[in-house]
Amino acid sequence: MAKARSLVGVDVHANKVVAAVLDAETGELQCFGISGDVGEAAGLCAGLPRPVRAAYEAGPTGYGLARELQRRGVQCVVAAPSKIPRAPGDRVKTDRRDAELLVRLLLACKLHAVRVPDAGEEALRDLVRAREAVRVDLMRCRHRVSKLLLRHGIRFDDGRACNERHRAWLAQVQLGLPAAQTTLIDACGAVDALVHRRDQLERQIVAMLPASPWVSQVARLRCLRGMGNPRLSYEQPARAPGRRPILDSGTPRRTTVLRPPGSAHISLTARRAQQPPDRHQPSRPHQHQRERQRATTGCSA
């Protein structure tokens, strides 16, 4: 890779972009403020003396600027915000200072780049995230229904509270007070709407799977043991990166819960992708005892 003549640190916002331009030959540093239009920012970088390298932090504005810069022949680094080194006493944060920090770190090669997906991959990622957001909303709505009934002393003791039998039981519940009954009807309607949205999104995801370039990689990952099996201990070789055993003192008591310190969405998706549904696992009391001892030792440490 040729040494860059112009280095650009870009602080990107929705309505404003601040670019710090460093000339590697003269050492001159200039700052420019432009609108948040991707084309204008890419045009500024493309008009500098070549070769040009640019960098900006990954954020809510997405990867459109990076793809446009690459299309115009400008090398672009999308930096991970959590990996950007900052001085402990540096408490002044402005757009210009952020842009200058980026260009200095780019010159020193201290930025950790993230992979820039293409437009199709980013759209599929947004679809998966939309399904995950609906799942979280559905869980919260179901909790509202169960806690509303619990405040009125009503419990469902006939199996799991997420099936058609439970929904038919909810339709027959009468709370007596008009306000409470209206609240229950509204909460149940929200649950039904979210279930419908979740099913629609899942059908779209399944329909797009054959065209995904990651089908073969996911199929290989499903062959690995241990990523979604809570009975396997932390010391076994099939453990997932960044996972650790903890002790859960709730009811019922659990000692084999694995809580990842990193991205919860990535960990949850990986475990679900490799775990077959409704897999029966026979009881192994000796292994359970060893797992409890390991989990207790890990928590006390």
Image (tube, helix red, strand yellow):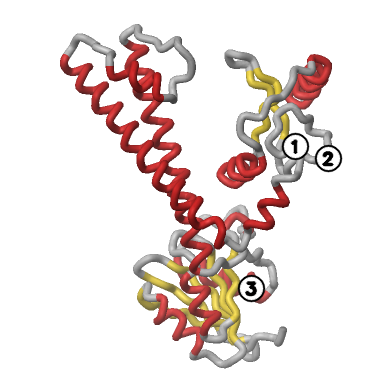
**Left or right of 163 in this view: 214:** right
N-term-proximal mark, 2 vs 3 = 3
Residue 161 picture quarter = top left
Of badges 2 and 3, the one in the foreground is: 2
Foreground residue among 92 and 3:
3
Q: What distance separates the C-alpha of mark 2 from that of mark 3?
A: 37 Å
Which residue shows up at 59% across the image and 60% down it?
80
Report the residue marked by disc 3: 106
* Amino acid of disc 3: Leu
Foreground residue among 73 and 217:
217
Which residue shows up at 40% across the image and 19% down it?
165
Q: What distance separates the C-alpha of mark 2 from that of mark 1?
A: 8 Å
* Amino acid of disc 2: Pro
Quadrant (top left, top right, bottom left, bottom right) of the N terminus? bottom right
Mark 3 secondary-structure assignment? helix
Foreground residue among 176 and 71:
176
Picture coordinates of residue 52 (x, y %)?
59, 85
Report the residue marked by disc 1: 226
Picture coordinates of residue 205 (x, y %)?
48, 52
Of badges 1 and 3, the one in the foreground is: 1
Q: Can residue 97 be seen in this view?
A: no
Mark 1 secondary-structure assignment? loop
Which residue is most to the top? 153
* Amino acid of disc 1: Gly
Quadrant (top left, top right, bottom left, bottom right) of the C terminus? top right
Residue 22 picture quarter = bottom right
Say if 219 sits above or below 24 in the image: above
Say if 247 sits above or below 200 in the image: above
N-term-proximal mark, 2 vs 1 = 1
Q: Which mark is residue 237?
A: 2
Foreground residue among 221 and 257:
221
